[in-house]
């Protein structure tokens, strides 16, 4: 397995700024990083090529899309061999209501972040999709009452 080259201070600063302001111009980014435009643009391309920058997107208010109900779901599997984990992982990718899925080291196997339009649509997603995922033995749901912080790096 080849190691990735280490990031220097300029690369880290570029990543911090772009994570917070994906639409920043090269000129503004260069000014904030303390380099000229050409080296900043070359560094950006290199960071994109090596996968340090996975893409750019708009952060849309989920409420505008009618998806402001957030539930966190603990999932316990009946089988945790690699083939069972792979089957579960592949199936999770096909469920649009699952916004995030993390394998956990603890008393359960996965933690899902599920976003829907309300309790009724969440219950349907749980019954029709999540509970029927491969090797699911049990689930526990925690409904978010308020989102205090959700986006990447803090500004400032």
Image (spheres, rainbow, N blue to C red):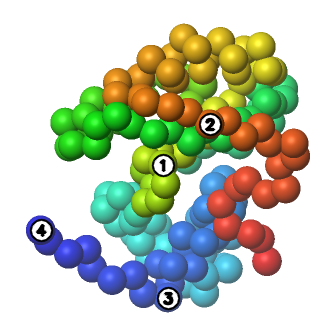
Q: Which image quarter: residue 79? A: top left
- Judging by the rendered image, the residue that carries numbered circle 3 is 9
Q: Residue at x 65, y 12 (%)?
A: 124
Q: Residue at x 50, y 84 (%)?
A: 10
Percent position of residue 113, x then y: 62, 40
Q: Are marks 4 and 2 in contact (CB under 8 Å)?
A: no
Label 4: state its secondary structure. loop
Residue mark closest to the camera, 2 vs 3:
2
Q: Tag 1 or tag 3, which sits nearer the N-term?
A: 3
Percent position of residue 149, x then y: 79, 57
User: Label 4: how many residues lie within 10 Å, few (<14), some (14-19) or many (20+)?
Assistant: few
Label 1, label 4: how many angstroms apart (C-alpha)?
Answer: 30 Å
User: Label 3: how many residues lie within 10 Å, few (<14), some (14-19) or many (20+)?
Assistant: few
Q: Are marks 1 and 2 in contact (CB under 8 Å)?
A: yes
Percent position of residue 4, x then y: 25, 74
Label 3: state its secondary structure. helix
Outermost residue to the left: 1
Q: 107 above or below 144?
A: below
Residue placed most toward the observer, 62 or 139: 139
Label 4, label 2: how many angstroms apart (C-alpha)?
Answer: 38 Å
- Judging by the rendered image, the residue that carries numbered circle 4 is 1
Residue mark closest to the camera, 3 vs 1:
1
Q: Tag 3 or tag 4, which sits nearer the N-term?
A: 4
Q: 62 above or below 148?
A: above
Q: Is residue 107 visible?
A: yes
Residue mark closest to the camera, 4 vs 3:
4
Percent position of residue 23, x then y: 66, 53
Q: Tag 4 or tag 1, which sits nearer the N-term?
A: 4
Residue mark closest to the camera, 1 vs 4:
1
């Amino acid at each position: 397995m080849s190691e990735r080259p280490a990031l220097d201070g300029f690369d880290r600063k570029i990543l911090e700024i772009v994570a917070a302001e994906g639409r920043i111009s090269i000129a503004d980014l260069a000014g904030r990083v303390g380099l000229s435009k050409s080296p900043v643009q070359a560094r950006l391309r290199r960071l994109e090529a090596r996968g340090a920058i996975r893409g750019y997107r708009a952060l849309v208010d989920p409420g505008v899309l009618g998806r402001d109900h957030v539930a966190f779901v603990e999932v316990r599997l009946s089988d945790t061999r690699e083939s069972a984990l792979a089957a579960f992982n592949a199936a999770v990718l096909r469920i649009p209501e699952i916004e995030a899925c993390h394998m956990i080291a603890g008393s359960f196997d996965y933690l899902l972040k599920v976003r829907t339009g309300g309790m009724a649509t969440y219950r349907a997603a749980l019954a029709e999709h999540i509970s029927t995922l491969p090797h699911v033995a049990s689930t526990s749901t925690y409904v978010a009452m308020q989102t205090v912080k959700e986006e990447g790096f803090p500004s400032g």
